[in-house]
Amino acid sequence: MSPPELGGLRAGDVLTRRYLLLEQIAWGGMSVIWRAFDQSLQRMVAVKLLDGELGSDRGGRELIRREARATARLIHPDAIEVYDYGETVTPHGRLAAYVVMRLLEGRPLSDRISEGPLPWAEAALIAARLATVLAAAHERGIVHRDVTAENVLLTATGAKLLDFGIAAFIGEDDDDGTSDYGTPPYVAPERLTGRTADPASDVYALGVLLFEMLTGSPPYPERTWEEIENARREGPPPEIGVPGLPPWIGALCRTCLSHRPEARPKAQEMADGLAEALVVVRRPTENEVMRWAVAAAATVVVLLAGALVWNQLANPAGGRSTPSVALSSGATRPAPVVTPGPDVSKPFPHPTAQDHRTTVQEHRATKRPPEPKVIPSSAPGLNQSVRRFNALLAEGEGKGRIRPDVALDLRQVLANSICCSRDLTSIRGKIADRHREGSLPDELRHALETQLIRVSVALTR
């Protein structure tokens, strides 16, 4: 399929004496997205262009204007950023409405799904990030209304939610022509009845998307408006038969697919639930602790025997060298000194099997050692995620957006959460508290929460 030439615009044309059009990178319906160069600010941008006959297509221009306003109102690192909006007459005498956005490089999520289901941790991470974007939009009164795999871009820095082209404000009636817009498999049942814009419809669409990422296909087979309108769905949403999927994630996804909007979780609740499910805290069992204790005791015996042999060989004339022996507790004590008798040719008495048994029995009879701490993985993923979290704090501190004491507090709470419990509840609560008291701006709060999801995934490795 060849790209449309809207209004005769071609590569090399300059829009409003500022945006140099370079190449078309996406298109659909009556709009096209260009890769362009902003000659005023000397940066690459994306320009979404809608054009038509002069004075015509007022509805289309209103939609793109609404998209620009809704997206500009939302500030979140995982949502596309709007730089400019305007209407102009093209060199070919047509009226064009355009919106200028940050240029993102990546791959549509739909392409990734076409290759097969995603690993559950990857799917949950993407859904959690999208849920945080939707939560931020809902806080500002915006309902996206077109959360689909086509509108999610997988970039080097994670998943990004695109295209607020049919966004509406919470409580707004579907009487502006947008009720017929959307992608059928993702449209919540209540939207077919003409209800007002509700955040619950976004949660439903995200539930469909999560189901699709996990299984490779949407939960229901209907793909056209006619099929959906004629569908009579009764009973609970379908089960998710994915091996190894934590039950909580499957249950959360099915709750998002509830036919009743009031039964679905809030977007932030979904983000929190997925993040918590990604944190797997594994502590050693009692049998493992006992095996480690026995192994430690045997190690003491071997080291003791080795030390005695070394002393005999190194000091055949009765030297007084006193090597130290490492104990299971980490302390040291002097090894027994062996002083040979007059007959130095007498064989050295090696420890017997009974000696080993006695030492193990004595170790078992002592107080049970404390449960070993779960040491966080040293994999680069965890270290990089923590460093990125701290870098966000440093950047905010450097720009004067947060106080140094707030940044230090958050760094310490994260370090304690990882080293001591591997549970990120404390740091999430601390971020919420700092935001509530006005010490943490919205944009930085969302960036930190998004980074915590990466930390959660790294902790599961």
Image (cartoon, helix red, strand yellow):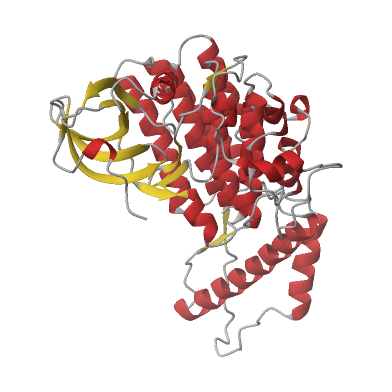
Q: Position of residue 325 (x, y in %)?
A: 56, 62
Note whether residue 329 is visible: no
Residue drawn at 46 percent across, 18 percent down: 442
Q: Position of residue 174 (x, y in %)?
A: 61, 20
Query: Looking at the picture, does residue 371 appear above or below residue 288?
Result: above
Q: Nearer the viewer, residue 329 or 266?
A: 266
Q: With 24 as the anchor, is 312 left or right in this view?
A: right
Residue reaching furthest to the right: 235
In the picture, residue 461 is in which quadrant? bottom right
Q: Position of residue 374 (x, y in %)?
A: 62, 48
Residue drawn at 53 percent across, 59 percent down: 114
Quadrant position of the N terminus in the picture = bottom left
Residue drawn at 64 percent across, 32 percent down: 203
In the picture, residue 444 is in which quadrant? top left
Q: Position of residue 445 (x, y in %)?
A: 47, 23
Q: Nearer the viewer, residue 442 or 233?
A: 233
Note whether residue 248 is visible: yes
Residue reaching furthest to the top: 437
Q: With 20 as the anchor, is 97 left or right in this view?
A: right
Residue drawn at 39 percent across, 25 percent down: 57
Q: With 236 as the anchor, is 376 left or right in this view?
A: left
Query: Looking at the picture, does residue 241 appear above or below residue 73?
Result: below
Total tally of numbered discs in the picture: 0
Q: Nearer the viewer, residue 242 or 113?
A: 113
